[in-house]
Amino acid sequence: MPVATGRAVAGAGAPAFGPWRRALERWAREVGPAVAGPVLAGAPEPVARVLPELGGTPPPPGPAPSGPDERLGLFEHVAALVADAADAGPGLVLLLDDLHLADPASLMLLGHVARTDRRCPLLVVVSLTDGALDDDRAAARAALLRAPATVRLAPAGLPADAVAVLLRRESGRTPDEATVAAVVRRTGGNPLFVRELARVPDSAAQELPAAVRDVVAGRLAVHPAPVREVLVAAAVLGGGVDADLVATVTGTAVADVLDRLDDAVAAGLLAPDHHFAHEIVRDAVALQAARGTRARIHLRAAEHLDATGGDGAALAHHRLAALPLGDRAAAVRAATAAADLALHRFAFEEAADLLERALAAGPGGPLERAALLLDRARAQYLGHDVAGAVRSCEDAAALAAHLDDPELLGRAATLLPEVGDAGWLATSRRWCRTALAGLPDADSPLRARLTAQLAAASAWDDDRAGPDRVVATGTAALAMGERVGDPAACAIALRALQLARSGPAGTRPRLDLGDRMTALADGLGDSAELWGRLWRFDALVQLGRTADAEAELDLLEPVVARMRRPLPHWHLVRNRACLLSARGRFTEARAAADEAIRLAERGHHPAAEYPAHALRTSIAMLTGDPLDPRLPAIERQQPPPRLLTMLTALWQARHGDAEEAAALYEQLPRPETVALRPFMEVLFHATSGGLAAALGDDRAADHAYAALSPWAELHVAAGAGVAWTEGSVHGVLGVIAGARGRTGDAVDHLRAAVAADAAAGLLPHACLARARLAAALRRRGDAGDRAEADALAAEAAGTAARLGLALP
């Protein structure tokens, strides 16, 4: 059908029946004279008088109408003309836009057309806001809504997926989830506002596009000054509109405030419950006030809340927003108190924001700034902004160096004991040594924590003398922590000991360390139990005790739920994904691994992104799924060993391109030259050994075989921070032995792998071991080998098909 659009425009010079004239003129042009001519030829003189565009040269003006009946006759004629136009072609769609701006007669004509009983293929689509209308327009609108043919649509905002599409279309950039969520929150999905935000560099930022400000300013301008004053005050105060507080800051009676808010509801600026319809509208209304006016409104609100014992977060907000009016020290005190309350309520991001605003409030003493920085770092870490927490600690340490204050430096060094990023560990190790040199030699909680953190950070140091030194330092720190009664120092020391014993020889001692850490939960809370159970999980996976490892996760789940923090949730999801993959539940494993990746990315936490991507790649190794194209970029962000590159090469060797696998292998350092931290020993040698066997590197394969042989009864997994398991070490030893032509050894190792993986419930790995055992038996060719091989191969093929496992 032809679609004819007529848009109403505001202003004293706008012609009567303007939308109708534009729409019908466009219809005539679109359908052409062959269709429009006969329809227009039959139009009576009154139609040509008010719609001159349709009839060429209008006739001389006739006598002025003498009563309302003559206009009713005109409406009848126009309705007949519109119906004839619809009948003359395949139908007609009239789109009358912004009709709240039109002259009242245009609205009355629309109501008449809506009530006509002539049946024809006509659809009239009208857009108009629910804003304030004068009496004539309001009456015409009410009559239109009463017409039987009228269907009223109250469009909701666009959903998040549509907002994402619109942002991408308008900006040319693909927005992330956080940006989409911020835009939806600010705009309520209003397409105009979404489109305007898409045109600013950061759609999620608080910048307000000029077009949005102009729209809101236009809506405000029609209201008298008292209504504007109340609305602006309500917008500046933010949040839900508190009529009592608005009345206080404006010096207006509450009843008058309510009346003026009702006027704003009628104008579409407020929802019926007196909340702003959209956050971005509230921001635009607030900007109608000058900065000084906004500051005075905030100061009056803060004084009122101070006097009445109001909400602490609101008090902090208004005191900070009032600056430079008011007392800066009082604003900072209010912000720190509100941030502390927010932390207790698990509102970590709110706490970090309050402390950021306190820091921005202006110059305080360096010790005050340092304390605020450390408080902010803790809030940022709890909210999973690890990178931000590290930067805050670095800023505090810079102040400590300026003040030559070893105690302050020590607090910065020990604030983030759970962070395992290589850069942070090197930095905190340096700070620990400097702070310890400046502190008294006597036992103290801070000295115990620094000694423990030095041990824990040194466990990651490639230049360390060895784990024995870490054990000695960690043991001394643990003893000091126990002497001074500081559970936090004991926890950091236990972490150092766990890392020092993260090699394959420390598997069972780590179970005891996990129990000791869990026992600190009475003093340290859920964080201690989290780490104790994670350490036990790592050890149990490496021991092949999968059911016990799963039980640890079941015990961990309520702990993580209580903590309400992204990083503990990341640990739980990652470990669940590891076991799901190891049991062959690949659909669930993929979903959990992808969630772990999203959580790590959201926290800008490379040390968490890397193992999450490695886990997802290990699933692809089993299933043949395509690899994430981001892996090379992620690999470049981390120091050796190049585990993701090794996994990518191994995937290519098994499922892809052998030449690509060889090219990637050439980029890797020789495995015998790589300095390994203890927790990586089994996982690294298993991966490099499997890759060397696949690509025919005999020296590297022999090196891996020798390194793994003492640990044949363990399972392939990291000793700390398990990302995935490859099942029994016997399986890798069997692959290497087979590649080196030692078929008898291969058969023995692979039989042991089948038994160990089956006993652990690792169906994919038991299946792979059976398939490899079948191949080894065929190569050996002893009596009975062929029959056994056929049976094993058939069993493996059936299991693989059921699981979605890609056999080599």
Image (cartoon, grey):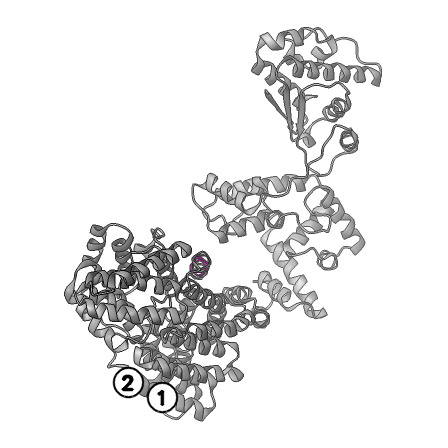
How many numbered callouts? 2
Disc marking residue 475: 1
Depth check, front residue: 442 or 607: 607
Question: Identity of the amino acid at label 2?
Answer: Arg
Q: Main secondary structure of the magenta part?
A: helix
Residue at position x 72%, y 69% in the image: 308
Quarter assignment of residue 755: bottom left
Q: Residues within 10 Å of mark 1 (few under 14, many from 20)?
A: many
Could you tell me if the residues under marks 2 and 1 are in contact, i.e. CB atoms within 8 Å? no
- In the rendered structure, which disc, 2 or 1, sits on the residue that comes first in sequence? 2
Q: Is residue 170 above or below residue 98?
A: below
**x and y, in percent, of residue 372 in the image:** 49, 72
Where are the magenta residues, as a range? Answer: 594-598
Q: Is residue 546 left or right of residue 348?
A: left
Quarter assignment of residue 293: bottom right
**Furthest residue to the left?**
699
Q: Is residue 21 left or right of residue 689?
A: right
Q: Is residue 344 left or right of residue 464?
A: right
Residues at marks 2 and 1, CA–CA distance in whole angstroms: 10 Å
Question: Badge 2 is on which residue?
Answer: 469
Depth check, front residue: 127 or 274: 127
Indicate the secondary structure of the residue bearing disc 1. Answer: helix
**x and y, in percent, of residue 431 in the image:** 34, 77
